[in-house]
Every structure is written in structure tokens, then in C-alpha cells.
Amino acid sequence: MTTTLSESAEPGMSLLPALKLGPITVDTPVVLAPMAGITNTAFRRLCREYGGGLYVNEMVTARALVERRPESLRIIKHEPDEVPRSVQLYSVDPVTTGHAVRMMVEEDRADHIDLNFGCPVPKVTRKGGGSALPWKIRLFESIVSTAVREASKNNIPVTVKMRKGIDEDHLTFIEAGKVARDSGVAAVALHGRTTRQHYSGQADWSAIAALRESLPDIPVLGNGDIWSAEDAVRMVEQTGVDGVVVGRGCQGRPWLFGDLQAAFEGRQERHRPDLPMVIRTLLTHAQMLIPYFDGDERKAMQDIRKHVAWYFKGYPIGGALRSQLVTVETLAQLEDLLGQLDQSIGYPGEPAEGPRGRAGSPKKVHLPEDWLESQELNEEQREMIKAAEVDTSGG
């Protein structure tokens, strides 16, 4: 059940000041979390039309970037109206990290760089990357300090996004947060779950509050279970964070960023979209994907399919039409199917709100051999890391 804006944010008064990341000022302290296959240029621009914030691209791997793989270069491409340009980088190797950051600096490809230490998927953690990496604290420090050193050559702020740790017995967020701060990052974002939790259960906002208390001298951002503007307000009040990071909560709801801006500005306005508004937004999203895929309409329609269930969550549009919408091949076909929907359907209320995406259940964590025996790398792990750069971007 959503709540109303709390009394601590008086109408017309900002809940939080602007977020400062080096030379960048983010007036609305909200960050779009990088999501593989979702936060491409089209979706970022759509979200930005509704509200302010920092809009981060899909994760790109350092190795694929240095090798100038076409898909990775596509991922870090920004349109002229996307300011600031925010890139999330994944790496397990300090040398490759340095090369990738240097490339982005020298070729003027980013205004802000975020380092991914939060990804829990097995293909990443079994190679020691993502949310598994902060356990190896010296490796973590080396990657972060290298990125900061190279980015500072053009005054580009670096931030870190991480999880609580691998599991409840191997928590790393306080130590890693302090190391990141001492390495010169502009902010630290914490997802209040462990690797083992994946996206299950509830995010631990008390951990976010603990990190905020441990790092009083740099911005700390909170991530996890923000499904509405009211959730964001509660997180700020309960944890004292300087801003929020929103991931799954905006899937099929780019207008959430309008709600978040209103809430942080102390306004009560919220989007309560009727079906025609949802249809228009979905269609606009699909149209914007076509130039992103260099005019490949079929690829754009394949991409929009994953968004259909999120956009129409809670709306009674019928199973047959839903099935057809997730198999569209052309824009004309999509327009025809959307035209068959009942335009008189209004906002359905609670069924359209709340969690989206698959929460799943806690999962076995896949790690390199003997990873948890020590926080330092052994020789075998050192060799493994040199060859372990995941060579696919976006996830």
C-alpha cells in the first residue's frame, strides 16, 4: 500500500539538496540504475522526458570497450541532448580498467563513470567480478584507484555501486565503502542485498543507513525496493542518504521519474496513467528504439517485447492481445495491436503499482575456487583474473 508524502517534506520545500558529483550537479538526486538490455539510449531519453536525474547507460565491460567491439561502442553512445553522459564500467582487472577509462577520457565519451561491483549473475561472479569482487579488497582498491586516477585527468567523477557482500557471513560494504572514499570516488551507492539474495526478499535499508553513517564526508546513495516516489521519501527519511538509485521500479513506468522529482520538490502530483497514456508511451518507446538499432525495425520490435508486461501490469487488456504483443515483428503490427485496446480503460490503482520484474529466491553464489578463503588473491586467482574479463557488455 503506498503512503502519502510524509509531513517532513513540506509542500514546496525540497526534501534533499542537489547531488554534487565533482563538477556535476544533479538537481533531482535520483539515479537510473544500469540494467542490461533496458537502459539504452531510447529508454534513458524517455525517462528524462518525465523528470530530472542522472541516467546511466547499460553496463559495458572494460575489455570489450578497449577492443572497440561495435555493441560496446553502441552502449556508450549518447545523443546530444543526454547531459551529463553517464557510463557504467565493469572490470576485474586494474590494467584493463585503466585502458578503458583513458580511452573514454581521451575520446571525450563520458562525463561520469560508475564502477559496477553490484552485479550478482553467475557468469560475472564465477569470474570474481561484480558483487564478488569487493571481497578481494586490495583488488577492489586497485581497480577503483586506477579508474579515479585516469578519470581525474579530465575532471570526470567516478562513483561505485555495490552490494552488502557475498552473503551474511561475508559482508564487505563498510570496508569497501571506506576504501572507495579513500581512493577518491565522488559517491558510493549501495544495493541493500547480498549476492546470495540476488533480487529476492527485502532490501536491507538499515545497511544503507549504516554506510551513510560510516561515510559522512561523501554522498551515499540508496538502492533497493523503490517502487514509488513514497518509497524513495521513506528511504531518505530512514537512512539519511543523499539520493536514491532506481532500477526495476521504473520498468514499464518511465513516468516514475516525474513522480520522484515532484516528491523531492515537496509536491503531491503523481502520474496515474490511464490506458491511452500507457499506449502512447509504449509506442514512443518502440519508435525511439528504431534509430538506436540503426534503423533495424525488427530488432527494435524484438527489444520492445520484454517491456510489454511491465507497461501493462495491472491493466485488463486480455491474454490473447498480450500474447500477440510479445511476438510483434514490425512497428505497423505493434500500432495495429495497440489500436485494438479499449481506450476507455482508466488507471487501475494498486494492481499497476508495486514490484515488477522477477524477484526469485536466494541463489547459490558461483565463485572462483577458494575465493572466500582469504580477502587477498592467491597466485592461481591472480592468473585467473588476468584472463577473466567478461567479453560481453550489457549484462
Image: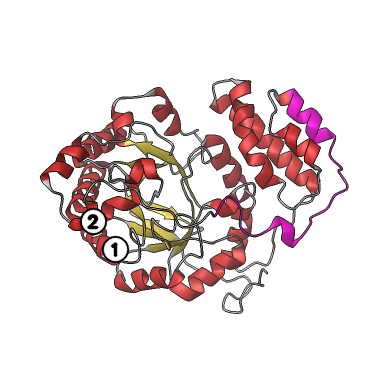
Colour scheme used in the picture? secondary structure
Residue 222's tag is none
The part of the chain drawn in magenta is 332-359
* Residue in the foreground of this view, choosing between 292 and 393: 393
Image quarter (top left, top right, bottom left or bottom right) of the C terminus: top left
Q: Amino acid at mark 1?
A: His
Q: Residue at x 51, y 65 (%)?
A: 202
Q: Residue at x 19, y 50 (%)?
A: 139
Check the image and report above or below for 117 versus 386. below
Q: Residue at x 38, y 44 (%)?
A: 122
- Residue 342 included in the magenta stretch of the image: yes
- Residue 157 included in the magenta stretch of the image: no
Measured as percent of width and height from the top left, residue 367 is found at: 30, 48
Q: Is residue 116 visible?
A: no
Measured as percent of width and height from the top left, residue 264 is found at: 56, 65
At numbered mark 1, what does the secondary structure look like: helix, strand or loop? loop
Check the image and report above or below for 215 versus 187. below
* Residue in the foreground of this view, choosing between 108 and 279: 279
Q: Is residue 242 visible?
A: yes
Task: Give the Cα separation between the discs numbered 1 and 2.
Answer: 8 Å
Q: Earlier in the sequence, mark 1 or mark 2?
A: 1
Q: In this figure, which residue is indicated by the disc labeled 1?
A: 170
Q: Do the numbered discs 1 and 2 sit on residues whose CB atoms are within 8 Å?
A: yes
Q: Hey, which quadrant is residue 337 in on the image? A: top right
Measured as percent of width and height from the top left, residue 221 is found at: 42, 62
Measured as percent of width and height from the top left, residue 34 is found at: 46, 45
Count of number-bearing discs: 2
Q: In this figure, which residue is indicated by the disc labeled 2?
A: 372
